Amino acid sequence: MSETITAGAERRTISLSLNGSPTQVEVYPWITALDLLREQLDLVGTKKGCDHGQCGACTVLVDGQRVNACLTLAVMLDGRELTTIEGLATGDELHPMQRAFVKHDAFQCGYCTPGQICSAVGLANEGRVGDTADIRERMSGNLCRCGAYSNILAAIEEALPESEQAVRP
């Protein structure tokens, strides 16, 4: 970052739970969660697509709710729980949604896949899914340039019951 831009700027220390681990990091007030993840924390699973909140490639979970990391300032994460695609699996055991995406070949180039999966997990956390049309509507903020939508939908439909049960004891 340019010394001219940062001259006199104060960094802020934020504390958060990052993929289940307590984390403290210093950030400038204007740094987005996406840039924090990719540039400071080297968690590059979350993708930078449009950088305007229109494609969903940067979708992560904050306190279990899906958000666009490109539109979320890092300072807003102070005291929160942030889960990225890297934090969904437990060791070598994939999250049910990740397993379903692999099973249904719900990706082609794979660029949108982390955001699609995080969004689908957030959808399960919301617990308000009705039918297939409802899933399509609620996932409409996540774009796939390759057009793997039918496989993405099949994966979500399969994994949704197990993912919802994981949220509610």
Image (tube, grey):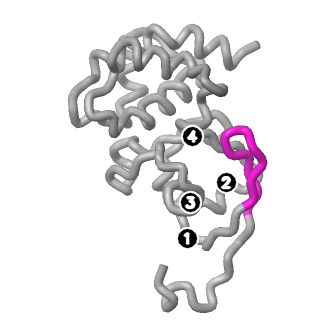
Q: Alpha carbon of mark 2 to alpha carbon of mark 1: how far? A: 13 Å
Label 1: which residue? 30
The local secondary structure at tag 3 comes to helix
The reply to whether dot 2 and dot 3 touch (C-beta < 8 Å) is yes
Local secondary structure at mark 2: helix
Q: Label 2 to label 3, Cα distance in Å?
A: 11 Å
Mark 1 residue crowding within 10 angstroms, few (<14) / some (14–19) / many (20+): few
Amino acid, disc 1: Trp
Say which of marks 4 and 2 sits in front: 4
Q: Earlier in the sequence, mark 4 or mark 2?
A: 2
Q: Earlier in the sequence, mark 2 or mark 1?
A: 1
Lower position in the chain sequence, tag 3 or tag 4? 3
Callout in the foreground (4, 1): 4
Which element type, helix, strand or loop, lies under badge 4?
loop
Tags 4 and 1 in contact by the CB under 8 Å rule? Answer: no
Label 2 crowd bin: few (<14), some (14–19), many (20+), radius 10 Å:
some
* Element class at badge 1: loop
Q: Position of residue 101 (x, y in %)?
A: 41, 19
Amino acid, disc 4 = Thr
For discs 2 and 3, the disc positioned in front in the rendered view: 3
**Residue 151 appears left or right of 82:** left
From the top left corner, tell me how far across and down residue 7 is, in percent: 58, 91
The reply, left or right, for residue 108 in relation to residue 133 is left
Where is residue 45? Give x, y as percent: 47, 43
Range of magenta residues: 14-24
Which comes sooner in the sequence, label 4 or label 1? 1
x 39%, y 42%: residue? 57
The residue pinned by badge 2 equals: 77
Q: Are the two marked residues, 3 and 4, in contact with CB atoms closer than 8 angstroms?
A: no
| Residue at position x 63%, y 91% in the image | 8
| Identity, as a three-letter code, of the amino acid under mark 3 | Leu
Q: Which residue has dot 3 on it?
A: 36
